[in-house]
Amino acid sequence: MRVDLHCHSTASDGQLSPTELVERAAARGVTTLALTDHDTVQGIREAKNAAMQHGIQLISGVEISAQWNGKSVHIVGLNFDEKFQPMLDFLKKQQALRQQRAEQIGERLANAGIPNAFENSQKYTAGEVTRAHYARYLIEIGKAKDMKQAFKRYLGVGKAGYVKTQWCEMADAVAIIRQAGGVAVFAHPLRYNFSRNQIRRIASDFACCGGGAMEVAGCNQNSEQRQFLHQLALQESLQASVGSDFHFISAWCDLGRDLVLQEGAQPVWECFVT
């Protein structure tokens, strides 16, 4: 069994359609996949249809942008009812925030001498424009050589195109996922600019407000990082999840790559994988 419970499609900021994503997962030997697009479930139906054709179990998923003490965090929801109306209403509000932010980024880039960036970035997505889509456009027009440089020059914190958004509270994201019958997962804990003590505090608060699992295995982790996350999940009585956070084909990240749990971890998928 090869499991990957965190990836993205063109329904948000991924570069493969839901069908193409599932096809790549199948080619990579993934048997259980969760599509976790940002604040949307629009790609799940297409992904499920493709998964049936390839013998993959497709788990409903979403990655919700939230905040903890004013700092941005991401909460993945797994195995919930993607037709649950309160969840859809919640995500609609999140999408409105994304749309507002995207338009403001476009305005700021225009002021920085890059006109029509919002309109031209829309071609990359079937959903809301994100910073990743702006980065692709900046690369296309020669303003940056790669994604890293696009963020460093224009889209990162403090740069001309950066816009801070007041996302929902972490506890609210956890609550709506649970109401929809799913499990809330603290996503990629080491991908934020947090100290280890802050990560411990977030994990503790996350567990206290009903969070059920934490991603402990991802691409490009070293053994020390994986051991830290493994022990933290055990300490907070959180189940263990795995996810590549795949957005596009690259040398450093791919579906199902190196997503192995350490001995003693309790896999979050045991309760819903058949």
Image (cartoon, rainbow, N blue to C red):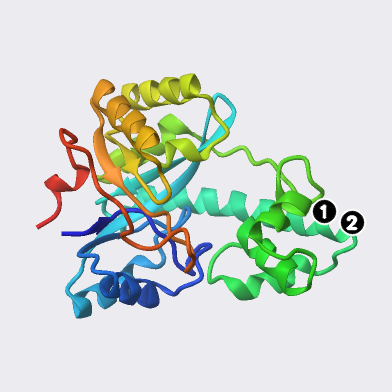
Considering the numbered disc 1 on the image, is that residue within a helix, a strand or a loop? helix
Question: In x, y percent, where is residue 238?
Answer: 26, 30
Which residue occupies the foreground of this view, 159 or 216? 216
Callout 2 touching callout 1 (CB < 8 Å): yes
Q: In this view, does 202 lie to the left or right of 208?
A: right
How packed mark 1 is, by other alpha carbons closer than 10 Å (few <14, some 14-19, many 20 or more), is many
Splitting the image into 4 quarters, where does residue 203 fall? top left
Q: What kind of residue is marked 2? A: Asn
How packed mark 2 is, by other alpha carbons closer than 10 Å (few <14, some 14-19, many 20 or more), is few
Which residue occupies the foreground of this view, 124 or 23? 23
Regarding residue 179, the answer to whether it shows in the image is no
| Mark number, residue 108 | 1
- Determine whether 241 is above or below 225 in the image: below
| Mark number, residue 89 | none
Question: In x, y percent, where is residue 137?
Answer: 71, 69
- Determine whether 176 is above or below 45 in the image: above
User: Could you tell me which quadrant the C terminus lies in?
Assistant: bottom left
Considering the numbered disc 2 on the image, is that residue within a helix, a strand or a loop? helix
- Which residue sits at x=82%, y=53%? 108
- Which residue sits at x=48%, y=64%? 251
Q: In this view, does 220 lie to the left or right of 223?
A: right
- Which residue sits at x=72%, y=68%? 139
Splitting the image into 4 quarters, where does residue 42 fall? bottom left
Question: In x, y percent, where is residue 235?
Answer: 27, 21
- Which residue sits at x=50%, y=40%? 191
- Given the current orientation, which residue lies at the most extreme bottom position? 53
User: Could you tell me which quadrant the N terminus lies in?
Assistant: bottom left
Question: In x, y percent, where is residue 140?
Answer: 72, 74
| Mark number, residue 111 | 2
Q: Is residue 265 left or right of residue 117?
A: left
Determine the CA span between mark 2 and mark 1. Answer: 5 Å
